[in-house]
Image (spheres, rainbow, N blue to C red):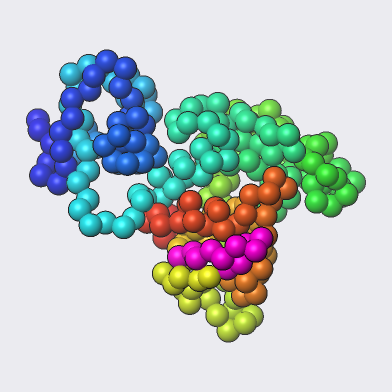
Amino acid sequence: MSCPSDSSSYSIKAGDNLFDIAAQKLGDGNRWWEIKKPDGTPFTEDEAKNLQPGQEICLPIRGGTTTKGGFRGFLEVLGRRETELPSGDPNQYKVENSLGFIGKYQFGEPLLIDLGYYIPKDGIFFGNGADKNFWQGTWTGKKGIDSKSQFLNSPDVQEFAVGEEFTLNWKRINDTLRGQGKSIDNFLGKEKIFIDRGVSKTVTISLSGILAGAHLRGANGLADLLLKDQVSADEFGTSILQYMSELGGYDVSPADF
C-alpha cells in the first residue's frame, strides 16, 4: 500500500522518530501527529515508539496553509512549552516545578479547585495566602483522583482536565466580554498592537492563542488584555503575549474541547 496523493512517502531509517522527522520535513516537530501510515490512519503512541527501518510513512502536503496544525498539535506544543520536555515523553505528566505546578500542563491549586479536583486546607492556596502550591489540602476523588501522586500518574485525567480548563476559560472570557457588548468572535483573526515592557508587539488573535494566554494568566488576565490592553506576565516573567504568539495559529474550535 502506498501513500495517498495528498501526502509524500518517507522510509524510516535507523534512529528515526516522528518528532525529528516532522521537525526536518514539516518545519515543526510538534506536527508529528499529522504523519500517517499508508492506510491513512495515525500512529498510536506505541507504534510511534516502535518504528522499524524501511517502514513507509506518509507526510502531509499542505500547500499554502497558514495553520500550524490541529488541536492535538496545539496540546503537544503547550505540553512541551510548560514542561520543557519533548513531545511524547511520558515524564511530562510527572513534572513539578519550583512553585509546585504539576503535570504536563502545569496545573496549580486554583485551577484544580475551580475544576472540582481539590479542596484547599483552611482556604489557603497559591495566590490566596500561599506563595506556592503546597498541596496540603484534600482531593475530592473526581475521576478517581485522591492524591497529588495519583494525579501525576494519570495522563488521561490530565488530558481531560485541560479540556475542562479550556471550556471554563472560554465561558469566563466570553461572559466578561459580553458585559462590554463584545465576544471572542469580535477579536479572532485581527491584528492588535500591545506595549509589553516598553516594546511594541503585534499579535494576531486566534482561538489557540486565547486558550494559551488564559492558561498562562487566567481568564481575567486574557479579558483584560483584549479589553484594556493590559499585558501581564507569570511569576517567571513570561508574557501573556509570548504564549499568544507561540501557541497561536493552530486550527482549534470550541468543538475540540
Does residue 227 appear left or right of residue 68 in this picture?
right
In percent of width and height, residue 38 lies at: 16, 33
In percent of width and height, residue 178 lies at: 59, 79
Instruction: State the residue lying farthest toward the bottom.
Output: 181
Dominant secondary structure of the residues highlighted in magenta in the image: strand
Q: Is residue 102 visible?
A: yes
Q: Is residue 211 visible?
A: no
228 above or below 238?
below
Count of number-bearing discs: 0
Does residue 47 appear left or right of residue 147 in this picture?
left
Q: Nearer the viewer, residue 18 or 177?
A: 18
231 above or below 86?
below
Q: Quadrant of residue 155?
A: top right
Q: In which quarter of the image is the N terminus?
A: top left
In percent of width and height, residue 131 lies at: 83, 44
Does residue 253 appear left or right of residue 8 in this picture?
right
Residue at 66% x, 68% y: name it: 230
What residue span does the magenta drawing correspond to?
194-204
Q: Quadrant of residue 249?
A: bottom left
Residue at 45% x, 70% y: name it: 191
205 above or below 31?
below
Residue at 67% x, 55% y: name it: 233
Residue at 78% x, 37% y: name it: 135
Q: Nearer the viewer, residue 26 or 173?
A: 26
In percent of width and height, residue 73 lies at: 40, 45
Q: Nearer the viewer, residue 216 or 252?
A: 216
Does residue 185 appear left or right of residue 180 in this picture?
left
Q: Is residue 179 magenta?
A: no
Q: Is residue 201 magenta?
A: yes
Q: In which quarter of the image is residue 49?
A: top left
